[in-house]
Structure formats: C-alpha cells, structure tokens
Image (cartoon, rainbow, N blue to C red):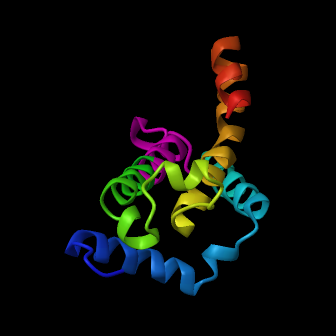
Amino acid sequence: MTDLNSSSQAILYFIGVLDSFGAEAWNLRTVTATSAAVFFGMRMTIGHKYAIDWDACVHAILSGFGSAICVYLNYYAAINMTGITEPLGSISCNGPLTSLHRIIPAITQGYAVCDIINGFKLGPAFLAHGIGE
C-alpha cells in the first residue's frame, strides 16, 4: 500500500475496521438476508416517519456512498494495491479489490425485498425493478 494518497489510506483504514469483523470472509447470502431483514424491519417499525421512506433513504446512503468509495478506490488505488488497474483486475478474475467491493452488491440485493413490496403498491414497472436487483 505504498504511494497511496491520504484519502485512499483513510478509506482503507475504514475497510480494515470492517475486515477486523471478518467482512472479507462474510457469506454474501448471509449479508443479503441480514440486510433484507434490517431494511424490512425498518420499513415495519419506522415506516414513513416525517414523510421520509427511511429504509429507502438508508439504502441509498449505504449503497451510494459505498459504491462511490469503491469507484474512488478503483480509480486511485487499485494499481498501487494490486499492480493491476480496475476493471482489468476484476475482468481477469482476480476477485474484488476490497471487502467493501464484495458486500455492497449484497446489501443492495437485500434491499430488493423492499423494492418488491413497493412494486405491489406502485405497479409492474417498480416490481420488475425489485426483481431485477
């Protein structure tokens, strides 16, 4: 991890904290099921308090910032971390760059349960969106 800028080092420190909880080896089906349960639980307990769809808001924040961090690391840190640029590393089947790259899609997939529920209320186009995740 030499030659990484301070922003990349700070992000990798945060990912290291996730890894200290075992994130690099988490079962992705478990991550999906857990995130589905959390988002569904939020939907049932908090709902639309203050006219905000809280499960959607939390999902958007997690997936949005998490994905932005992954893109940042792909662009600014991949070559220093692995010696291969992204997406060439992923295309070459070298696996995800970090554990965050592994779990963000699983979290999004877990939120699909709420999208499917919304689809029954909002119509077939929204239902297809949830099933497509």
In this picture, is 89 found above or below 120? below
Q: Is residue 97 left or right of residue 30?
A: left
In this picture, is 80 found above or below 69? below
- Indicate the position of residue 41 as horizontal and vertical percent values: 67, 54
User: Which residue is found at the position 65% from the left and 32% from the top?
Assistant: 115
Image quadrant holding the N terminus, namely bottom left
User: Which residue is found at the position 67% from the left and 39% from the top?
Assistant: 112
Question: 21 or 72: which is nearer to us?
Answer: 72
Question: 73 or 108: which is nearer to us?
Answer: 73
Of all residues, the one furthest to the bottom in this rendering is 20
User: Which residue is found at the position 38% from the left and 64% from the top?
Assistant: 79
Question: Can residue 27 be found in the magenta stretch?
Answer: no
- Indicate the position of residue 23 as horizontal and vertical percent values: 61, 75
Q: Is residue 108 visible?
A: yes
In this picture, is 54 found above or below 7? above
Question: 22 or 125: which is nearer to us?
Answer: 22
Q: Is residue 73 left or right of residue 107?
A: left
Identify the image quadrant of residue 128: top right
Question: 30 or 46: which is nearer to us?
Answer: 30
- The main secondary structure of the magenta stretch is helix
Q: Is residue 42 visible?
A: no
Question: Can residue 49 be found in the magenta stretch?
Answer: yes
Residues drawn in magenta: 46-63
Of all residues, the one furthest to the top in this rendering is 124
- Indicate the position of residue 87 as horizontal and vertical percent values: 49, 48
User: Which residue is found at the position 39% from the left and 51% from the top?
Assistant: 71
In this picture, is 118 found above or below 112? above
